[in-house]
Amino acid sequence: METQRVVSVPSEAAPQLEIHAPSAPVESQKKPKARGRTIVVTSGKGGVGKTTTTANLGIALASRGAKVVLVDADVGLRNLDLVLGLESRVRYHVLDVLEGKVSLADALVRDKRVQTLYLLAAAQDREKDDIATDAMIGLIEQLRGEFDYVLIDSPAGIEMGFKNAIAAADEAIVVCTPEVAAVRDVDRVVGLLGNRITVQLVVNRIRPALVRKGKMLSVDDVNAILRLPLLGVLGDAPDVIIATNRGEPVALDDASETGAAYRAIAARIAGEDVAAPQAAEPEGLLDKLGSFFGGRR
Amino acid sequence: MLNRVMEWFRTLFGTPSSSSVAKERLRLVLLSDHLALAPDVIEAMRRELFDVISRYVEVDEAHSDVSFEHKEKGIAMLASIPILSIKPREPESLPKEETSVLEAVTVNGHTSDNYGRRPRKRRRRKASGASQTAPAQ
């Protein structure tokens, strides 16, 4: 589907102008700092778990010792602070920084539970069109000089807010639930991400019992259509709901199964060779008989 | 694997599961989405279609129409291409003296430029088969 990709990037390597390798001491001094990775979490459809995934992956990556900043790009519908439980500590937002009202350092909220995690909140009283794409790219570039990971929580949709969110990202995690509408939207979004951005898939809210009964698309079904590298699979667990109620993401909870799944995804992002994403819980005999003798719809 | 076997039994004994209905619906809607999002591909396809047909007949391109129709089980491409006239068979580009075999090939519906990569054996068989019909013309 190359043709539907909107963002195009010249595939040719830059012309080789330098004849000598840069070996002069002046140039080695100028060598830029290691740049962090910029990863946008997106999906097209709303309500599939983008913000929850951003929050938990931020916590899981920071718990590994990485310096992580989470950027809420959902201007006008700020939520990442709430899911993280940091809402009471947000004083400034992205637009305050972009408009020069405060410094970037002043706008960053540091998570007290995981000391290497920071949040840059979205503006709540503004609109997505208020941010210029170039300004957003500049901001993310600045952040990646300071952090190992810049995770950008994209808004739903494919309009301006989405475009701003992906503009500075090199990688994307697309979140998809096993529903027809979510799959279709992810397919569209992947087309818009173009060849420049590396895309990986997280399938969220899988219910293995329903999958076995033929009442829910399986991870394989979803990915037979999307054909993306599978980064992780998350179950539809009640502890996520409880965690969001409390503002204490599951990745903070060592006992949580979903928390462990997020930690495994974080390890995979960091390049560890963690076991392949789990597909489903072991199947019981009753389930097999039950699904065989009917009860499908 | 087990799921697939179960699915097979389900389809054998009546209605398909809702997840397989979802799969099929997704397949169709994405096919249609991708076509709609790729006007350049459709144009290239249309172009080549005309090129091929124009080798044999004169077509009225201005009154042609290529469209897609949604059917229950898939999407069909419909091409309506008015034909103005049939083109005369292309004269062979090779010298006349060698025509006995080549003419026969033309009678068989293959012009002489029918791909040098065709296996030799097959060509010879076709040619000899056709040469029997050639004198009848």
Image (spheres, coloured by chain):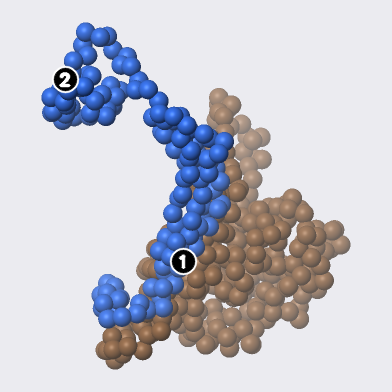
Q: Are marks 2 and 1 on the same chain?
A: yes
Q: Which mark is residue A223?
A: none
Q: Nearer the viewer, residue B29 or A253?
A: B29
Q: Is residue A166 left or right of residue B44?
A: right
Q: Nearer the viewer, residue A233 or B117?
A: B117
Mark 2 or mark 1, which is nearer to you?
2
Q: Which chain is brown?
A: A
Q: According to the image, label 1 marks what residue?
A: B26
Q: Which mark is residue B135?
A: 2
Relative image position of residue A165 (x, y in whole percent): 67, 59
Q: Residue at x 41, y 33 (%)?
A: B52
- The answer to whether A25 is drawn above or below residue A235 in the figure is above
Identity, as a three-letter code, of the amino acid under mark 2: Pro
- The answer to whether A95 is drawn above or below residue B42 in the figure is below
Secondary structure, mark 1, is helix
Relative image position of residue A171 (x, y in whole percent): 55, 56
